[in-house]
Amino acid sequence: MKNRYNVLFLCTGNSARSIMAEAILRQKGVPRFGAYSAGSRPTGFIRPEALMQLQTEHLSVEGLRSKTWDEFAKPASPQMDFVVTVCDNAAHEACPLWPGRPVTANWGIPDPAAAQGTQDEIARAFRDAFVKLDRRISQLLALPLEVLSRQEIQKEVERIGKE
């Protein structure tokens, strides 16, 4: 059994969903999980609504930043055990090859950054995305990784993304 598993959440812009997933796992997964996020075409900023949602949930936003997935494809980068896309755009893009053959899955979540309407409707879109991510991350944390084969873990992580 490993002592620590690294999880990279990917999205296109790395401004909302993947950032929220990183913050959730960073708090809930300690000390067993390391959490990271990145984007294929990062916006370079975090959506204020995502930061507000995290703060509402009493999650730390310290150190969060929008960054490219190239940072995690370098030889000196942490080795990833899981690479999870959280948006449909990233799921259809060519992802870099990750050293160590991590478990991969798509947990597609509607993009709250694309939400339109009143401030309340936009805030609800961010809250809904957060709730889905939180539920899926809780399911990941509940997996008995120490007794499952790699193939079983792959199937379970994929199943989580379909719920």
Image: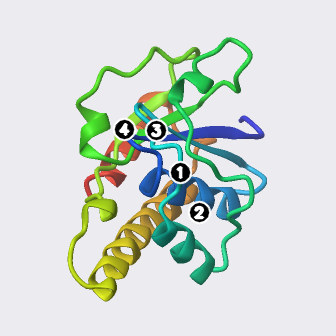
Report the residue at 68% width, 64% height from top: 61
Residue to which mark 2 is pinned = 24
Q: Which amino acid type is shown beneath numbered disc 1?
A: Phe
Q: Is residue 122 left or right of residue 19?
A: left
Q: Earlier in the sequence, mark 3 or mark 2?
A: 2
Front in this rendered view, residue 148 or 58: 58
Q: Is residue 83 left or right of residue 63?
A: left
- How many numbered circles are shown? 4
Q: Which amino acid type is shown beneath numbered disc 3?
A: Pro
Q: Which amino acid type is shown beneath numbered disc 2?
A: Ile
Residue to which mark 1 is pinned = 45
| Contact, mark 3 vs mark 1 (Cβ under 8 Å) | no
| Contact, mark 1 vs mark 2 (Cβ under 8 Å) | no
Q: Which amino acid type is shown beneath numbered disc 4?
A: Ala
Report the residue at 74% width, 60% height from top: 62
Report the residue at 73% width, 49% height from top: 32
Query: Could you tell me residue 40's position as x and y percent?
Result: 41, 31
Determine the CA span between mark 4 and mark 1.
25 Å
Q: Earlier in the sequence, mark 4 or mark 1?
A: 1
Q: Is residue 46 left or right of residue 58?
A: left
User: Of tags 2 and 4, which is closer to the observer?
Assistant: 2
Determine the CA span between mark 3 and mark 1.
8 Å
Residue 55 vs 98, above or below: the answer is below
